[in-house]
Amino acid sequence: MYTREEIEKRIEKLGEEQPWNHKIELPYGIQTVESKQISHGKNTIKWSRVEGYINQIDVKDKRVLDVGCNEGFFSMKLEKLGAKEVVGLDADEFRIKKAKYVSEVLGTSNISYEVVDIFDKSIEKYGHFDFVLCLGFLHRVAYPYKAIQQLAKISDTILFEWKSLKEGNFDSSVMKFCGGVSKDSNKYSGLYWLPSVRCVADMLKASGFVHNLVIDDSAWRRAIIISSRVDNGVFKNKDLISINKFILLKKTTRSYLGSIFRTLRDDRIKWL
């Protein structure tokens, strides 16, 4: 059992090596991140959005994979939901180092963490998974379709959450390239793509996932897609895009007017 002082010192030391990303509750009321989380890009908010769907899928006594597991928050949540085995993969050795420490402090028993690049050809050595959780990952990789194909080799059901394209979310299969440049010193936090919801849905279908449920949160541009090779109660409304009609109207109107305004200001156009 670790003392409060030991945990605080270790959390501080690990934070100096790399700032903490996940807000995780530790013994003595210690938290890895103290600030309140509001953005849909933060781990506690993400979990509040996906937990209900994962409960419907039911991961109890199943093998599950947490891709881009970061510091292990979601892996531990999956364990608490009764997963038989949880494997957390991340290309960032510092994040895995923190995940292992947190797991040690909290005494998790069936989670293993590995430093792995999803594009590694040996990904299949981890075996088959009943469910894959992939949060905040797809927009961070240079080859999202290849990543989906890699995961398709080893899984039946996947839940993706990612930063989606602001325009063209619902009616076109497109992606916006963002350069992949990171805003901080972490080379894995670069933003490469903003795929539309339809684009990700189409890539999943092309990879053999015939059952799809699409949930979009237009206000925050953080989309969720659940895809599977097998039917499940969560797919009662197949290929559903659940959105707020007022937000959609506001969004599309703003996009339309913005396009007109940019066209009128374009000096390359010679008006008759």
Image (cartoon, rainbow, N blue to C red):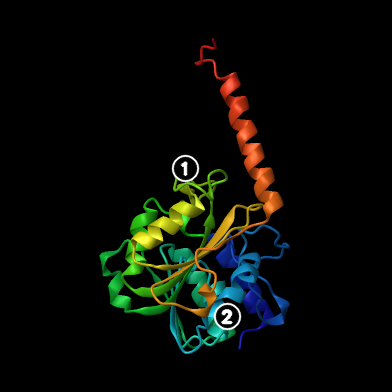
Q: Circle 1 sits in a helix, a strand or a loop, which is it?
A: strand
- Foreground of the two, 102 or 77: 77
How many marks are shown on the rendered structure? 2
Sequence-wise, the earlier of marks 2 and 1 is 2
Q: Label 1 belongs to which residue? A: 176
Quarter of the image containing the N terminus?
bottom right
Looking at the picture, how far across and down is residue 176, in whole percent? 47, 42
Given the image, on which type of amino acid does mark 1 rest?
A: Lys
- Relative to 30, 66 lies left or right: left
- Residue visible at 49% across and 88% down? 109
Q: Using the image as rendered, state which of residue 2 and residue 118 is in the foreground.
A: 118
* Extreme residue in the left direction: 121
Q: Residue at position x 61%, y 37% from top?
A: 255
Note whether residue 186 is visible. no
Amino acid bearing label 2: Asn
How dense is the environment of label 2, judged by Cα within 10 Å: few (below 14), some, or many (20 and up)?
few
Circle 2 sits on which residue?
A: 55
Q: Position of residue 21 (x, y in %)?
A: 59, 62
Let me know if residue 157 appears in the view. yes
- Mark 2 to mark 1: distance in Å? 33 Å
Q: In the displayed structure, does residue 142 sit left or right of residue 219?
A: left
Label for residue 243?
A: none
Q: Secondary structure at mark 2?
A: helix
Q: Is residue 105 above or below residue 220?
A: below
Residue positioned 34% across, 68% down in the render: 152
Front position in the image: 132 or 168:
168
The quadrant of the rendering that contains the C terminus is top right
